[in-house]
Amino acid sequence: MHGGCDGSFSDGRQVVDKLRMMGFQKGLLPVAFELDCRHCGKRITMDTYEFSCPHCGAVHGVTPCHAFSADAVLCAGPGY
């Protein structure tokens, strides 16, 4: 998706922007993640590369290259 998966992102907005630019935002993750929302802390099940927390609206993103680790999920903030 970027630089042969060698690229890195410093914040969630960069991840979400890249997903939207490449058209991956609605794609299904290989395996859904159970994780705590990075903004409000409530438990969520993230099943797409871009996911909005149903509790607070914080948008989370993970690139396809890193979609096998919930640790790679970054938060872009509410309503991003």
Image (tube, grey):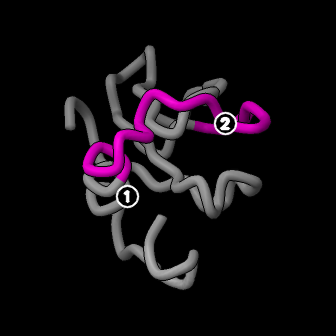
Amino acid at pointer 2? Leu
Q: Quadrant of residue 40?
A: top left
Along the viewing direction, whichever of 10 and 64 lies nearer the viewer: 64
- Residue projecting furthest to the left: 80
Tell me the residue at 66%/36% (across/down): 29
Asked if marks 2 and 1 touch (Cβ < 8 Å), the reply is no
Secondary structure under badge 1? helix
x, y percentage for residue 18?
32, 57
Tell me the residue at 35%/40% (across/down): 23
Q: How many marks?
A: 2
Q: How far is the residue under mark 2 from the one under mark 1?
A: 15 Å
Marking on residue 68: none
Q: Is residue 35 magenta?
A: yes
x, y percentage for residue 48?
56, 30
Along the viewing direction, whichever of 60 and 16 lies nearer the viewer: 16
The magenta segment is: 19-36
x, y percentage for residue 57?
32, 24
Secondary structure under badge 2? strand
Count residues near mark 2 (Cα–Cα under 10 Å), then give few for <14, some for 14-19, many for 20+. some
Q: Is residue 20 magenta?
A: yes
Q: Quadrant of residue 32?
A: top right
Tell me the residue at 36%/75% (across/down): 10
Q: Is residue 1 above or below residue 37?
A: below
Left or right, 36 with respect to 21, comes to right
Tell me the residue at 26%/53% (across/down): 17
Q: Quadrant of the C terminus?
A: top left
Marking on residue 15: 1
Amino acid at pointer 1? Val
Q: Is residue 70 above or below residue 2?
A: above
Marking on residue 29: 2
